[in-house]
Image (cartoon, rainbow, N blue to C red):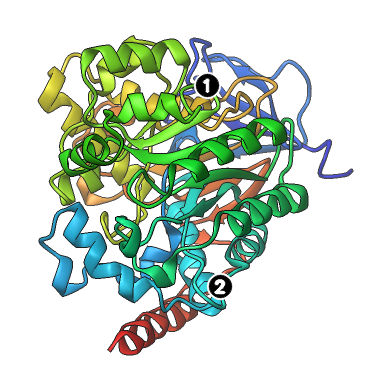
Amino acid sequence: MSESTRTVWLKNPLGIHTGDSADARGGLVVAGSTILEAVPAGGSPSSPVDEVYDASRHVIIPGLINTHHHFYQTLTRAWTPVVSAELFPWLKGLYGVWAGLTPRDLELATTAALAELLLSGCTTAADHHYLFPNGLEEGIDVQVDVVKRLGMRATLTRGSMSLGEKDGGLPPQSTVQDAEVILADSERLVGAYHERGEGAFVQIGLAPCSPFSVTTEVMRDTAALAERLDVRLHTHLAETIDEEDFCRERFGLRTVDYLDSVGWLGDRTWLAHGIHFDDDEIARLGAAGTAVSHCATSNMRLASGIARAVELEAAGVPVGLGVDGSASNDGSNMMMEVRQALYLQRLRYGAAAVTPERALDWATQGSARALGRSDIGVLSPGTQADLAMFTLDELRFSGSHDPLAALLLCGAERADRVMVGGTWRVLDGRIVGLDVPQLIAHHSEAARRLLARHG
């Protein structure tokens, strides 16, 4: 029997969150790469299955979806000079280090980021890679190879920086590119790698870094290219007050006005952070269907502020979660990110308004909407079989009563099993086919070399 038709019943889980209202307490039936059936409590599958897996020790959730990351930053975690810096000085301190990235550095950094995400129950990740110094012109190609090797799904965005220090931008000149180079490579990558339709594993988006690192022309031309190629748009926006001030001084506009002026205010766009929006801007974003990736840990780490996630969602904005880069989060653990989002949003809106289920929905179906996908993020018949299974056997869970709430409130960090498209990618807490100790050794050495090159 081929794997495409083999059926597996994940039977009677300890707890389950499907993201919809169907009763699936009896578990799920997976057929090939998709969910075939949700089994109600006390029930059995409607037709015979090929395999039964006893899930009575496991809490099952949809595979988590990370909507904003910078994989390369795993090489510069907890770097002393910027440990207590806010965004602009943090960036200024690190740009010079990142300018020394090599293809091998990026390969190791991407592998480390994706491995950490996968172990935390994440099955789909979006990366925002905007650094293409000499020798790293094919950085996205490097990332595609790593994604395929690990068997995850990814939206890899061809980022860009074109506004260097000499022209009033933030990044050093060695990290910026000409507009023609950016647009040509963007089109090349979409043609080479972008998969369409349900079940896509690799997708390409276009992602100028931020208003303070690209020209208005690049923003506008990228939006036109994305519309012509039918791919998604991504950028940082409204992360800090400094950014708001930059937009006012350089463009005479607030951030959402600027977004609108360059043709980005629409449902093709998802924004990283989205903290400093006023009431009118939230309404405009919602009316346009523009999505926001809430990055709770990074926003706390850099003291950037608290996104108005509940109000954004109420206005019609798709809200997803992102771990952001591992130099402003210092980790790539998506389950920990859900917990941080739960707690940070409770500070703004109260405990009753932000339940564990709501936070999980941000990290699953909300994130899927942000990436323009309806085939992932929930565990319903016909959707992709992307799921994570956690056990509650550790001391931290002893005495807990609600299995689903315990994942967040008691601090789950590592999945026991993870399935992507019907294939097990994590078994017994280990990534199938990846030597993690060897990865750590090579990745750590690359991090040391990168800092040594910086001098």
Q: Residue at x 23, y 23 (%)?
A: 308
Q: Position of residue 145 (x, y in %)?
A: 66, 64
Query: Crowding near pointer 1: few (<14 within 10 Å), some, many (20+)?
Result: many
Instruction: Please tell me whether mark 1 sits on a helix, a strand or a loop.
Output: loop
Answer whether labels 2 and 1 touch (C-beta < 8 Å). no
Quarter of the figure with the C terminus:
bottom left
**Mark toward the start of the polypeptide (2 vs 1):** 2
Image position, residue 42 (x, y; %): 54, 15
Closer to the camera in the image, 408 or 182? 182
Residue 290 vertical position relative to residue 92 in the rendered view, above or below: above
Q: Give the side of residue 289 with respect to residue 362, left or right.
A: right
Nearest the eye: 60 or 127: 127
The part of the image, by quadrant, that contains residue 180 is bottom right
- The amino acid marked with disc number 2 is Leu
Mark 2 lies on a secondary structure that is: loop
Residue behind mark 2: 136
Alpha carbon separation for disc pair 2 and 1: 31 Å
Percent x, y of residue 369: 51, 25
Q: Is residue 24 above or below residue 77?
A: above
- Please tell me in which quadrant of the rendered image residue 232 appears: top right
Disc number for residue 267: 1
Report the residue at 34% width, 22% height from top: 357
Image quadrant where one finds the N terminus: top right
Q: Can residue 244 be seen by looking at this rendering?
A: yes
Q: Nearer the viewer, residue 145 or 215?
A: 215
Total marks drawn?
A: 2
Q: Is residue 413 above or below residue 241?
A: below
